[in-house]
Image: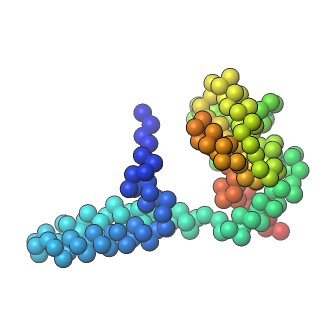
């Protein structure tokens, strides 16, 4: 069974927020516990702040690991300047570093990634499109249904329309672009 956190739960919202929000809540919980509880229970009551401390640490660590906006911009510019063979080879190498077996395919999906008996179809040939609509994502979803694989991903250096983004979310298609693309291709844009 796969566990999934509710999208609007307190912890899910804090995981999307800046680290200092969780740190402030932790300080408030600890301070209130220390101020209001009897002396014998102050330390035990302060332990209620630990989940918020853990979330603050996790979000701070994730933000430190994320590429800067300048680096994301340089990477996207470099990626847009690549030819398809260069870009495909860079993606293939990135996925292989992450432990995937990569197979190039034809049709709506350009790659098939396999790892631990899980297969992901990836469409990347339209990576240079400035704005992508819903139709290419529908084609990928049809290929996903036909292949009966577990997941799909769309690689793009551009933007998706709101409709396309909603469709991808409803079908479980992961969008790979921006910061994630910069993380995958760390050498792109460094020249």
Residue drawn at 63 percent across, 33 percent down: 119
Q: Residue at x 66, y 43 (%)?
A: 163
Across and down, in percent, residue 148 comes to: 63, 24
Q: Which is more toward the observer, 135 or 34?
A: 135
Q: Residue at x 43, y 60 (%)?
A: 14
- Residue found 60% across the figure and 64% down from its top: 66
Q: Quadrant of residue 153?
A: top right
User: Taking 175 as reference, is 128 left or right?
Assistant: right
Direction front: furthest residue: 163
- Count of marks placed on residues: 0
Q: Decide if residue 62 is in sight here.
A: yes
Q: Is residue 67 above or below residue 98?
A: below
Location of residue 6 in the rendering, given as x and y in whole percent from the top left corner = 42, 46
Which part of the image, by quadrant, shows the C terminus? Answer: bottom right
Residue 72, image x and y in percent? 71, 64
Residue 143's spot in the image, x, y percent? Answer: 71, 28
Q: Quadrant of the N terminus?
A: top left
Look at the image and tell me whether residue 99 can be seen: no
């Amino acid at each position: 069974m796969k566990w999934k956190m509710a999208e609007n739960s307190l912890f899910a919202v804090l995981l999307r927020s800046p680290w200092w929000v969780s740190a402030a809540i932790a300080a408030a919980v600890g301070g209130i516990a220390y101020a209001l509880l009897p002396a014998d229970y102050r330390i035990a009551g302060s332990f209620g702040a630990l989940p918020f401390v853990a979330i603050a640490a996790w979000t701070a660590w994730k933000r430190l690991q994320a590429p800067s906006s300048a680096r994301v911009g340089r990477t996207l510019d470099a990626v847009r300047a690549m030819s398809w063979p260069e870009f495909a080879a860079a993606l293939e190498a990135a996925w292989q570093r992450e432990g995937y077996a990569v197979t190039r395919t034809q049709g709506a999906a350009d790659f098939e990634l396999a790892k631990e008996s899980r297969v992901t179809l990836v469409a990347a040939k339209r990576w240079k499109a400035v704005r992508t609509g819903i139709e290419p994502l529908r084609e990928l979803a049809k290929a996903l249904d036909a292949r009966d694989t577990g997941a799909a991903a769309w690689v793009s250096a551009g933007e998706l329309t709101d409709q396309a983004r909603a469709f991808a979310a409803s079908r479980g298609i992961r969008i790979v672009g921006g910061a994630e693309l910069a993380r995958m291709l760390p050498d792109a844009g460094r020249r």
